[in-house]
Image (spheres, rainbow, N blue to C red):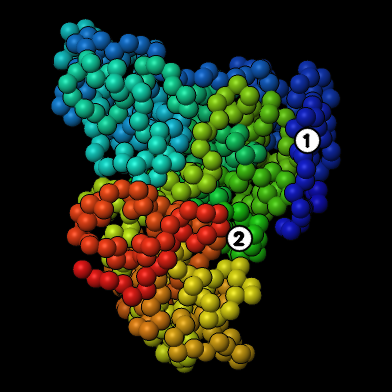
């Protein structure tokens, strides 16, 4: 086995994607040469027999795992619009709050905005998910991700169906979704064009109704539909066949550099398997291990998770609204796993243990979405996963499907099917118009402004709402008193070497913290060991718990909060949170658990605490909320200047 890279190794300057001839480890441990662009590959390796199929070289599986190698000339179509015209009364009928559309075989429908889609006749395929009559799903199509494409194929039951006089392969109903998400751009100007299009003006001349979605009839910059290369479709077909035939557990690992389409591939493959499992009435369970804390798909930024899903992944995802059968989330606190690698591996191992614990005797397919690193510490993460979990299918996405270093440096199981595909985001494909930080802020802002009771968003500034008050215990208490406290038992700040205890309140204000609970029995011994050493004692500062203690515990993540201020006089945290405080209270009061706040290194968007609506709008804006002056921040400061503090928190909160 090739030597593993150190968890603390510096990143290499390059990966060897430019090579056309590679050495890979054979099942026997010997090095064998594989030239992915040469017909002589078959002759140079007598242990592998290939069959040509659709531009892919498919290993027939003799003595080794299946290996697929994609030819380098595969490319995806750039989709910007629907490929047919909307003709009122012919293939579209407009109604108040919804539309009815007829689709013919070969039609491709691309929309932007929010809509519910229901099939009335035939079936529709949406980004590899098959939608049948009677099923209704909600899609949020924004240019944060590619816009879902709706298609259909030949129907055996072609007939004219109301409200149309001509037959269609499929008839679908598109309904408005009014949850106020479209107002986000006014609150967070960086996303001013993520929801709206220029086509809405043109479409309005055909009807008198307003919709929360727009048909893409003209190309617009930064608006692109989901494009699936032919090679990807072939891979989906092969993997689906393997998975449906195998009644045991399957694990699919996807690797590749940043912006190679790993998340897109995962979602499309998952949608394919979910549809086929339903069609064949297979009792499959689907889980996703999301281990990139910087750009997670199914949990909040700064976290990793293991989720069991039962609904398709379409359009722009909102992790807190996805239908999940179960979910385990671990707080990392940083966008990159290499900031605190030991903690990252500890939390990752806890999720891997859950995979092993829950997998016995079940028919489970687990997808692993790896970070966008394939060298240095990223290679160490992948090697750790491979040594801990049996990988049934490895998907490598790279330029012209050339081998990555990690493919040769890792000792893959001989039964692992290795599938090498060209990345979708090559030079011919458009890139995401938003930076990773903007996308991260989108997820955090939508999380903090979602109202679970009304299922709507409220993008008014948080500072116009009274914060939630939660008591904390100072550190000058005995351990039994700390553990019995029915509030915040302690706080921990990651990567805080050199921070003085008296400065902790200032370090917490206007910052994100995670809310976690830990069993009393587990943390008691840790605190007793710590108590034998010098422990900071204070009558006003919250009880401070060393990060090494928190990171060694099995904790339950309940959500994020923004600390508005720390009231040292009354020993209170003033916070904004969307976490289920009722569940937290029950755990603390009835289930022998303690509540702890943990701060990582996540920046709160300026708009959360000092919105442009406050600084630029008329005074009537906040006066309409019943305030004569701003109650939760000092209104005398401005956000002008470089390096200046943009807002001053008012600790003596003024109530209405």
Q: Residue at x 40, y 37 (%)?
A: 192
Q: Which sits in the foreground, 200 or 521?
A: 200
**223 relative to 256 in the view: left or right:** left
Q: Residue at x 52, y 89 (%)?
A: 537
Among numbered discs 2 and 1, the one appearing first in the sequence: 1
Decide if residue 399 is in sight here. yes
**Mark 2, residues whose alpha carbon is within 10 Å: few (<14), some, or many (≥20)?**
many
**Numbered circles on residues, count:** 2
Q: Secondary structure at mark 2?
A: helix
Expressed as whole percent of the image width and height from the top left, the position of residue 277 reads 41, 35
**Mark 1, residues whose alpha carbon is within 10 Å: few (<14), some, or many (≥20)?**
few
Query: Label 2: which residue?
Result: 344
Q: In the rendered image, which quarter is residue 257 located in?
A: top right
Between the C-alphas of marks 2 and 1, the distance is 27 Å
Expressed as whole percent of the image width and height from the top left, the position of residue 617 reads 31, 48
Query: Label 1: which residue?
Result: 16
Q: Residue at x 62, y 56 (%)?
A: 337
Q: Residue at x 45, y 26 (%)?
A: 223
Q: Which sits in the foreground, 329 or 143?
A: 143
**180 relative to 19 in the view: left or right:** left
- Relative to 525, is 320 above or below? above
- Relative to 176, is 186 above or below? below
**338 relative to 210 in the view: left or right:** right
Q: Which sits in the foreground, 343 or 159?
A: 343
Q: Secondary structure at mark 1?
A: loop
Q: Are marks 2 and 1 in contact (CB under 8 Å)?
A: no
Q: In the rendered image, which quarter is residue 49 located in?
A: top right
């Amino acid at each position: 086995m090739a030597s593993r890279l150190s968890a603390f190794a510096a990143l290499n300057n390059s990966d060897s994607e430019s090579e056309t001839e590679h050495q890979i480890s054979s099942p026997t441990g010997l090095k064998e040469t594989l030239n992915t662009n040469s017909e002589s590959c078959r002759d140079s390796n007598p242990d592998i027999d290939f069959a040509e199929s659709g531009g892919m070289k498919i290993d027939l599986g003799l003595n080794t795992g299946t290996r697929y190698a994609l030819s380098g000339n595969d490319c995806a179509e750039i989709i910007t619009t629907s490929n047919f015209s909307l003709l009122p009364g012919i293939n579209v009928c407009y109604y108040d709050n919804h539309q009815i559309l007829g689709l013919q075989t070969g039609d491709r429908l691309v929309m932007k905005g929010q809509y519910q889609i229901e099939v009335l006749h035939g079936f529709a395929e949406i980004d590899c998910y098959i939608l049948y009559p009677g099923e209704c799903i909600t899609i949020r199509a924004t240019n944060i991700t590619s816009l879902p494409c709706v298609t259909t194929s030949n129907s055996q039951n072609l007939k004219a169906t109301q409200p149309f006089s001509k037959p269609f392969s499929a008839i679908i109903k598109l309904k408005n979704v009014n949850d106020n998400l479209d107002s986000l751009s006014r609150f967070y100007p960086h996303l001013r064009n993520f929801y709206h299009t220029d086509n809405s003006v043109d479409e309005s001349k055909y009807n008198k109704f307003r919709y929360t979605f727009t048909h893409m009839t003209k190309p617009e910059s930064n608006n692109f539909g989901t494009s699936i290369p032919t090679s990807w479709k072939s891979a989906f077909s092969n993997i689906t066949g393997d998975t449906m035939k195998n009644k045991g557990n399957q694990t699919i690992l996807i690797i590749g550099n940043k912006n190679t389409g790993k998340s897109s591939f995962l979602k499309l493959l998952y949608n394919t398997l979910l549809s086929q499992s339903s069609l064949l009435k297979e009792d499959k369970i689907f889980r996703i291990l999301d281990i990139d804390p910087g750009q997670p798909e199914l949990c909040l930024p700064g976290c990793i998770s293991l989720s069991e899903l039962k609904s398709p992944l379409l359009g722009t995802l909102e992790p807190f609204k996805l239908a999940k059968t179960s979910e385990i989330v671990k707080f990392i606190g940083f966008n990159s796993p290499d900031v605190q690698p030991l903690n990252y591996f500890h939390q990752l191992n806890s999720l891997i243990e859950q995979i092993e614990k829950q997998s016995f005797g079940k028919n489970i397919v687990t997808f692993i979405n790896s970070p966008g690193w394939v060298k240095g510490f990223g290679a160490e993460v992948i090697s750790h996963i491979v040594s801990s979990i049996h990988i049934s299918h490895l998907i490598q996405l790279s330029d012209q499907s050339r081998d990555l270093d990690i493919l040769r440096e890792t000792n893959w199981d001989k039964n692992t099917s290795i599938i090498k595909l060209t990345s979708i985001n090559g030079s011919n494909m458009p890139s995401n118009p938003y930076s990773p930080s903007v996308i991260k802020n989108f997820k955090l802002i939508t999380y903090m402004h979602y109202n679970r009771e009304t299922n709507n968003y409220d993008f008014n500034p948080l500072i116009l709402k009274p914060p939630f008050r939660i008591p904390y215990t100072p550190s000058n208490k005995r351990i039994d008193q700390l553990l019995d406290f029915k509030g915040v038992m302690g706080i921990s700040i990651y990567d805080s070497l050199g921070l003085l205890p008296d400065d902790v309140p200032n370090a917490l204000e206007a910052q994100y913290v995670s809310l976690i609970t830990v069993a009393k029995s587990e943390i008691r011994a840790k605190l007793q060991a710590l108590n034998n050493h010098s422990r900071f004692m204070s009558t006003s500062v919250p009880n401070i718990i060393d990060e090494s203690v928190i990171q060694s515990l099995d904790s339950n993540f309940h959500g994020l909060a923004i600390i508005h201020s720390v009231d040292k006089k009354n020993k209170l945290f003033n916070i904004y949170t969307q976490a289920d405080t009722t569940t937290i209270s029950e755990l603390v009061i009835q289930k022998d658990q303690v509540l702890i706040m943990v701060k990582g290194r996540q920046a709160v968007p300026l708009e959360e605490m000092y919105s442009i609506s406050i600084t630029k709008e008329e005074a009537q804006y906040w006066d309409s909320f019943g305030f004569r002056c701003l109650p939760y921040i000092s209104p005398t400061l401005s956000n002008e200047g470089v390096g200046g503090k943009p807002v001053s928190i008012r600790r003596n909160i003024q109530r209405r």
